[in-house]
Image (cartoon, helix red, strand yellow):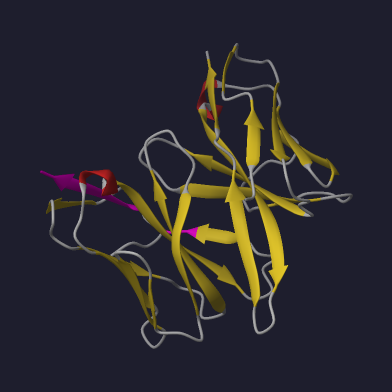
Amino acid sequence: GAVVSQHPSRVICKSGTSVKIECRSLDFQATTMFWYRQFPKQSLMLMATSNEGSKATYEQGVEKDKFLINHASLTLSTLTVTSAHPEDSSFYICSARRSLAGALTDQETQYFGPGTRLLVL
Amino acid sequence: GESVGLHLPTLSVQEGDSAVIKCTYSDSASNYFPWYKQELGKRPQLIIDIRSNMDKRQGQRVTVLLNKTVKHLSLQIAATQPGDSAVYFCAEIATDSWGKLQFGAGTQVVVTP
């Protein structure tokens, strides 16, 4: 199977500090990873697309200087929430894209990490 | 039905009955539509998907229908069980979008014994 891990699973930090979240694909290489944020009782909102070896692409309304993304290897992407504030408290989920070329069709499946619960006090 | 909305609708069904979740999508360039099940505090799990060259796909107790004319999707869960209680999301990937998933608002399904 394809396994994606995230670390930490939950973190509590003080307002104004920075928090780094790691997303790893454990048994496959992922040239593309995605970062989502999910508030309670809401859907997953795509924040950014992380491509190995290049700059991340941010969705409209997501501050790139606040949410720093680094994709330094084919198995690791990191999201750093800088100068965190209580409104940044959320569930952050990453996914890694795996492309499987079939005989007739291409299959693209995203495998999700277990998520990181961030609470900013 | 689901769309990119502001709240989470709830669908209550009795155990053993079918649950039907409807979804609309807006991008006519979308060509891949996965459905995810998410339990509280956990990662989304892919339960079934469909491509734009199909109008129906069946899995184990789940069936997805796609109507491209009106940009509607539906997910039917047959013979529901308490373990089916979760939030269900439709999603779409548009051609040339680098595989970016756009999620619908989600539907909370509650299966009562």
Q: Is residue A47 above or below residue A78?
A: below
Q: Main secondary structure of the magenta part?
A: strand
Q: Is residue A117 above or below residue B39?
A: above
Q: Residue drawn at (18%, 47%), measured in percent from left and top?
A: B111
Query: Between residues B10 and A108, which one lies in front from this camera angle?
Result: A108
Q: How many marks?
A: 0
Does the segment drawn in magenta span residue A115? Answer: no
Return the x and y of residue A114 as percentages of the image width and height. Answer: 55, 36
In the figure, is residue A84 to the left or right of B39? right
Q: Is residue B5 above or below residue A89?
A: below
Q: Residue drawn at (65%, 53%), measured in percent from left and top?
A: A59
Residues shaded magenta? B103-113
In the figure, is residue B68 to the left or right of A71? left
Q: Is residue B105 visible?
A: no
Determine which quarter of the picture holds residue A24: top right
Q: Residue drawn at (65%, 64%), measured in percent from left and top?
A: B99
Return the x and y of residue A94 as percentages of the image width and height. Answer: 62, 43
Q: Is residue A25 visible?
A: yes
Query: Between residues B113 and A9, which one lies in front from this camera angle?
Result: B113
Does the segment drawn in magenta span residue B108? Answer: yes
Query: Between residues A105 and A33, which one lies in front from this camera angle?
Result: A105
Return the x and y of residue A98 as percentages of the image width and height. Answer: 69, 58
Return the x and y of residue A115 as percentages of the image width and height. Answer: 55, 35
In the figure, is residue A70 to the left or right of A53? left
Instruction: Give the residue at the far right of this rendering.
Output: A53
Q: Residue drawn at (52%, 13%), measured in percent from left and top?
A: A121
